Image (cartoon, rainbow, N blue to C red):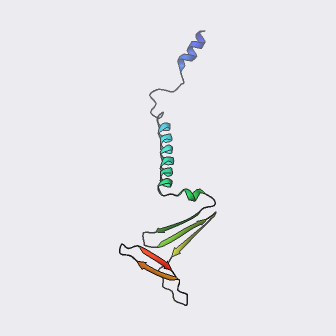
Amino acid sequence: MKYLRRKQDRGTGFSDNDPMTGLANLFDIGLVFIVGLLLVLFATYHLEDLLKEDSTVTITRQTGEGDMEIIVKKGRKIEAMRVSRAKTSGRGQRLGTAYRLGDGTMVYVPE
């Protein structure tokens, strides 16, 4: 009987004064925070379609230098195109007219 009591009195073997016991909990809280932040960002920018296989998404982004990039996702295929400011010349066909409104927005009117 006395041997059973001695094993119960020993406890878990961890000291209550160990400063590292709370570190595992902080790591878990950090992971939950990161996952929650990612979910909020996806919901805020309506990026749920990026995760669907059969969706079509077009994203335009501008770098710090002013270069434009268009990213198009059609189904499982993702294509990135850079927009250049180089002027071109040649023969072509008029497709419509573009107007700049007073507030700065542009409107394209096809013919």
Q: Which residue is drawn at 50% across and 51% down?
A: 38
Quarter-of-image position of residue 65 = bottom left
Q: Furthest-left residue in view?
A: 102
- Side of 7 relative to 97 (left or right): right
Total tally of numbered discs in the picture: 0
- The spot of residue 101 in percent (x, y) is 38, 76
Give the position of the N terminus as an image quadrant: top right
- Side of 102 relative to 8 (left or right): left
Q: Which residue is drawn at 57% across and 68% down?
A: 72
Q: Furthest-bottom residue in view?
A: 91
- The spot of residue 39 in percent (x, y) is 51, 50
Task: Return the residue nearer the eye: 93 or 33.
Answer: 93
Task: Return the residue nearer the eye: 24 or 20.
Answer: 24
Q: In this view, does 78 lie above or below 13?
A: below
Q: Furthest-top residue in view?
A: 1
- The spot of residue 84 in percent (x, y) is 49, 78
Q: Is residue 95 above or below residue 35?
A: below
Q: Which residue is drawn at 43% across and 73% down?
A: 66
Q: Residue at x 51, y 54 (%)?
A: 42
Task: Return the residue nearer the eye: 47 or 8.
Answer: 47
- The spot of residue 76 in percent (x, y) is 64, 63
